[in-house]
Amino acid sequence: MPVTYFANYIEVGFAEVKRCDLAEEAGLASGLDSIGRAIHGLADGPLTDAKGWIPRYVKMARERVILVTGSPKFQVYDTDFGWRRPKKTEVLSIEKTRAIYIGESRYEEGGIEIGMALSKSKMDDFASLFEEGLV
């Protein structure tokens, strides 16, 4: 972007890990490593890999993928357009894109909010597995 650019800019990053690698004992580390490589790849400059975005999206559409949108760094709860801070934020597109939203918590410094849109039966299954993981 030119030095005179003044606006928001959001870059696309792709982190890919095979499902079998995630299922191994070091699966979390594999996932985090892939995310780290994707983040470091963004340092090459904005739009460096833009020509490859569409082919990668097409490839992903044929596979099972997990899309993540948002970031706790966006500080959406600090936004005030004159109506006071938002009480709740949502990313409505997650219902259609099957993405997972991650954002900062309105109520706890350093906390995060996670949003998902699943069918009732799948949400019940997820809630059960989530609660088991917290025990």
Image (cartoon, grey):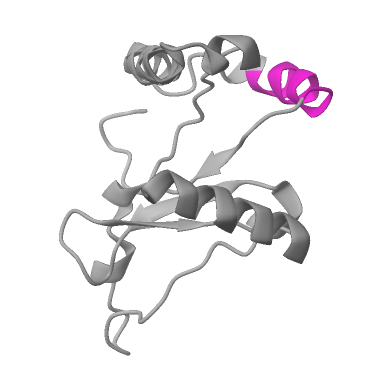
The residue at the point 15 percent across, 60 percent down is: 109
Place residue 40 in its image quadrant: top left
From the viewer's perspective, tell me whether residue 78 is left or right of residue 58: left
From the viewer's perspective, tell me whether residue 66 is left or right of residue 83: right
Report the front residue among 59 and 133: 133
Report the front residue among 123 and 84: 123
Residue 59 lies in the magenta stretch? yes
- Where residue 18 appears, as percent x and y from the top left, is 62, 12
From the viewer's perspective, tell me whether residue 110 is left or right of residue 1: left
Q: Quadrant of the N terminus?
A: top left
- Where residue 64 appears, as percent x and y from the top left, is 75, 27
Residue that extends furthest to the bottom in the rendered view of this protein: 83
Image height of 73 relative to 87, above or below: above
The residue at the point 46 percent across, 15 percent down is: 27
Residue that extends furthest to the right in the rendered view of this protein: 62
Q: How many marks?
A: 0
Image height of 127 relative to 50, above or below: below
Image height of 88 relative to 26, above or below: below
Image height of 104 relative to 107, above or below: above
Residue 16 in sight in this render: no
Magenta range is 53-63
Report the front residue among 114 and 62: 114
Residue 113 lies in the magenta stretch? no
